[in-house]
Amino acid sequence: MEEVNGREESSDWFVEYLRRQGDWLEKTRGNLMVAATVIASMSFQVMVNPPGGVWQSDNCSSGDQTGTVSVCKAKAGTSVLEHDSSKRGLYLGMVISSTVSFSASMSLILLV
């Protein structure tokens, strides 16, 4: 009789363990969803409002006195760091990493 109680006790423990595992999976899924949402929103915000800001107006200089030929260095709405040659590599690295993180987090959100 004691062996039967011992087996029931161990099987109850195992059933309780399996119930906790299911709960753990739900909590992990929720945590993944929160983390992916935060990463997606941060990477989206970095691309919408890049570090250094964006040009507010066209930066054009006229080529001659009549003003018929103008050369624009920057167009309104483009990133300031994109046109700075010393920081262009860092800017491109930021764009690539932001694009990868946004794509990965959106994929995770859709899969979860």
Image (cartoon, helix red, strand yellow):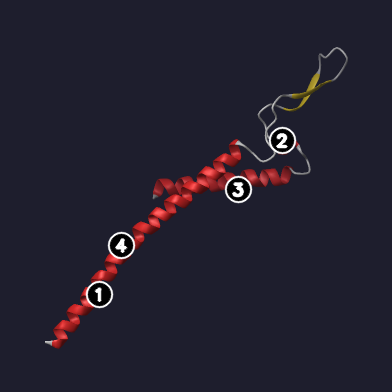
Q: Quadrant of the N terminus?
A: bottom left
Residue 43 sits in quarter: top right
The answer for how far apart the CA atoms under marks 1 and 3 are is 46 Å
Q: Residue at x 85, y 20 (%)?
A: 63
Q: Earlier in the sequence, mark 4 or mark 1?
A: 1
Which mark identifies residue 80? 2
Foreground label between 2 and 3:
2
Which mark identifies residue 22? 4
Disc 3 marks a residue whose amino acid type is Ser
Q: Earlier in the sequence, mark 1 or mark 3?
A: 1
Instruction: Find residue 60 and report its horizontal and vertical position in percent.
Output: 78, 23
Q: Earlier in the sequence, mark 3 or mark 4?
A: 4
> Image height check: is 34 above or below 71?
below
The answer for how far apart the CA atoms under marks 2 and 1 are is 62 Å
Q: Secondary structure at mark 1?
A: helix
Q: Secondary structure at mark 4?
A: helix
The residue identified by callout 3 is: 97
The residue identified by callout 1 is: 13
Q: Earlier in the sequence, mark 2 or mark 4?
A: 4
Instruction: Find residue 50 and report its horizontal and vertical position in percent.
Output: 64, 39
Foreground label between 3 and 4:
4
Instruction: Find residue 22 and report its horizontal and vertical position in percent.
Output: 30, 62
